[in-house]
Amino acid sequence: MLGRDDEYRSTLERAHHAHLEAAETEPAVRCAFWLGLALLLQGQTAPATGWFARAERIFEGEGIDSVERGYLLIPGLLQRSAAGDHDGARAIAWQAAAIGARFGDRDLQALVVQEQGHALVRLGRAEEGLRLVDEVMLAVTSGDLSPIVTGLVYCNTIAFCQSVYELRRAREWTDALSRWCEQQPDMVAHTGVCLVHRAEILQLRGAWEEALEEARRAGERFTLGNYDAQADARARYRQGEVHRLKGDFALAEEAYREASSGGWEPQPGLALLRLAEGDGAAAVASIRRVIGETADPLERAGLIAARVEIMIAIGKAGDARGDCAELERTAEHQGSWVLGAMSCQARGAVELDADEAAEALVSLRRAWRMWRQLEAPYEAARVRELIGLACRELDDNDGAAMELEAARAAFETLGARPDLARVEALPGAAEPEAHGLTAREREVLRLVADGRTNKAIAAELVLSERTIDRHVSNIFAKVGVSSRASATAFAYEHDLV
């Protein structure tokens, strides 16, 4: 727990041999198991396998029945899970959980029931699986487990929740992990990973400077082991993401390269960086390559969403319709709000690009509601920008102006400089309206100057007569006139017709 990994392993090894010499089989097997697991978590698969094999040989040679039999099922469980055999993993987890229950070993039960829940979620039985995960986490927060198992379950659960886009749960359990770490200031083993998770949650919430600081702090807590290097690389990637969104492209590229050097795939961030820099060809090549290497639907989801954005930007939105369908299938299979928001946003963006503004609005409104409930201000602002563009395509200039202004204000608050510049560059989106009139009010004034009645204007613009009455009253107040004749004269004097 102090991060002194070499001493931990050497002490376990001495204890293992001492127990063997004393003919104490169960504790000798337990030491061998924890040695194997420590090596496995640090990426040293071959020596880990050797220790697991030794533990099994010793245990089977004695022919005894004890809780260690359940622990020795864990390597096979993890192997099945890594291979995508979630049915096989669930079966082993159920068997190990039964052994843990029979011997009253809460640590074993927590480790394997957690994996059982993960397998169910991966199999599309999300509600059932997440109930098991939450049940295990109650044991963790109640202090029922040993410190090492507590830390492992915390980190595994949060990482899993993020991988399956259960960000609400990830946020709640990250807050709990933070409190646990704060109670033990000398602990090193899990604090760095905790800070990485916190950085990811803070980025989603729009607290970008805090996210950067947590990611930087994470690096200070990591030791030199391979496992820590991987987590450090993940922290570098998180820094790159925040820098990219803020428009600090040079810093983003440096962070992505550091992440790659540490073994973390810097995608889709690097591809989106290339797109922001205007290199669409590089963006397409990068995202195509990494998607081609990725088989798991959940791992593909974030990459697919990025490819949709890239294809629209380079004028090939038609090629992204298949990606939208894949996202929708994954979202339906998992029942995740985040995936649902991503799929609706992607579908709406493609429909908007295809001049299907009415259909796009249906998809985009759903996406915006989900992002808002998930408290994701940046993603919500991106969707509001698209909603504004769809409203403009449907000649609802008032709606467009309001949506684009809301997006602009959110980008400004977040410090999303590239997005802010893009919105402000839209025709009429951010510039002060002439003489204080909105685009819709200028349109109404032109029709007033043409001699139309309010009823005729309402019919032409497909608005209610009451709405036109309100627009005319606002126009009179803004330009300081009291009659239609004076408003007409104002329009001609100021070249508004």
Image: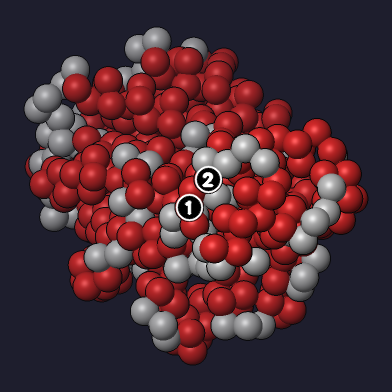
Front residue of 471/138: it is 471
Instruction: Give the structural element (helix, strand or loop) at label 1.
Output: helix
Q: Which residue is mark 2?
A: 479
Q: Is residue 248 left or right of residue 103?
A: left
Q: Is residue 215 left or right of residue 89?
A: left
Count of marks placed on residues: 2
Amino acid type, label 2: Val
Neighbourhood count class around disc 2 (C-alpha, 10 Å): few under 14, some 14–19, many 20 upward: some
Front residue of 242/496: it is 496
Indicate which disc residue 435 carries. Answer: 1
In the image, which is nearer the foreground, mark 2 or mark 1?
2
Instruction: Give the structural element (helix, strand or loop) at label 2.
Output: helix
- Residue at 24%, 40% (x, y): give it: 210
Indicate which disc residue 52 carries. Answer: none
- Residue at 27%, 70% (x, y): give it: 249
Image location of residue 218, percent across then percent down: 19, 45
Quadrant containing the C terminus is bottom right
Task: Tell which circle, 2 or 1, labels the residue nearer the N-terminal end.
Answer: 1
- Residue at 15%, 36% (x, y): give it: 188
Q: Residue furthest bottom?
A: 281
Q: Is residue 99 left or right of residue 228?
A: right
Quadrant containing the N terminus is top left
